[in-house]
Amino acid sequence: MNNRLLPKQSLAGKVIAVTGASSGIGAETARLAAAMGATIIGIARDAGRLDALHQSLPPGEHRMLIADLTDFAGLAGLVRELPKLDALVCAAGVSLLAPLRLLPESLIDKNLDINVKSPVMTVQQCLKQGRFNEEASVVLFSSIAAHTGTEGTCAYSMSKAALEGFMRPAAMELARKSVRINSIAAAIVRTPIFGQNDDSFFDQYRERYPLGLGEPVDVAAAAVFLASEASRYMTGSTIVMDGGSTWV
Ligand SMILES: NC(=O)c1ccc[n+]([C@@H]2O[C@H](COP(=O)([O-])OP(=O)(O)OC[C@H]3O[C@@H](n4cnc5c(N)ncnc54)[C@H](OP(=O)(O)O)[C@@H]3O)[C@@H](O)[C@H]2O)c1
């Protein structure tokens, strides 16, 4: 057997930057990747929560960088602080909802700035500054909202659809550098992104999804797969993780 083709999900020796590492899916991805041997560069705004993540990681050369990723003028400087990366996981995001009639322009901008412009310009800066190692992997967080039509999600859904629109041509350009880029379209998993701590909010989805409600770690497992060499023949693809709800 050609050993090169055995699935390689160990992340030993890999350096992975995770944006949105202070909470939810980003934090779980950082923990899972570190447990599999990766060195983590965690990026977010909240120093306290980043520090808590840092304390929870196994010993290593992990670093935490405090940054607002919508400070676009500062992005080039932030990327200059990064080492060469084997993976960039762009988990920072918001989900700001309003019905179309009441949707202010500022809410459209807030969704687009962190969900689209930030990952696009971070990937661009990493490319321009030669931050990607050979065969590096970029992981984006789309959502099933990019493909569905839940009321109130116009601005959020369009941001995730735009992100997937960015991913496909970017995959063609990055392939020339042997860099891959893929995304995950998750259904609802319980994180602080919805500003909801009420069980009944999540229970309604638990009943709608054939496999029940997923956990942040389920989505993190897909992110780690995309970051690893196990997915080395995938680029420009979206993994749908919806507990089977698409087929109901
Ligand atoms: N949870 C779900 O059900 C679900 C479903 C589908 C897709 N997703 C996507 O998955 C990704 C992660 O979501 P999550 O549920 O884990 O959300 P979360 O728990 O609210 O975490 C969001 C992260 O983004 C960071 N962030 C937000 N604005 C930022 C900014 N301007 N600069 C830097 N960091 C910023 C936050 O850190 P600070 O506040 O410390 O800056 C936090 O670490 C998002 O893109 C989301 O759209 C989530």
Image (cartoon, rainbow, N blue to C red):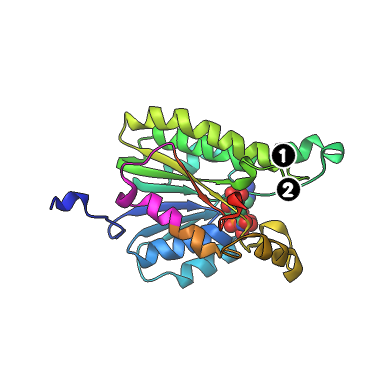
Which residue, given by chain and number where applicable, does mark 2 sit on? Answer: 96
Look at the numbered discs 2 and 1 and tell me whether their residues touch, using CB distance below 8 Å.
yes
Which residue, given by chain and number where applicable, does mark 1 sit on? Answer: 155
Q: Residue at x 71, y 67 (%)?
A: 203
Q: Which mark is residue 87?
A: none
Neighbour class for label 2 at 10 Å: few (<14), some, many (≥20)? Answer: some
Secondary element at tag 2: loop
Q: Residue at x 56, y 65 (%)?
A: 215
Please indicate whether residue 122 sits to the left or right of residue 248 in the image: left
Residue 150's place in the image compared with 210, above or below, is above
Q: Residue furthest left?
A: 1
Query: Does the magenta portion include 139?
Result: no
Image spot of residue 42 (x, y percent): 48, 56
> Which one is in front, 21 or 225?
225
- In this picture, which residue range is highlighted in magenta? 222-236
Q: Answer yes or no: is residue 83 visible.
A: no
Image spot of residue 237 (x, y percent): 44, 40
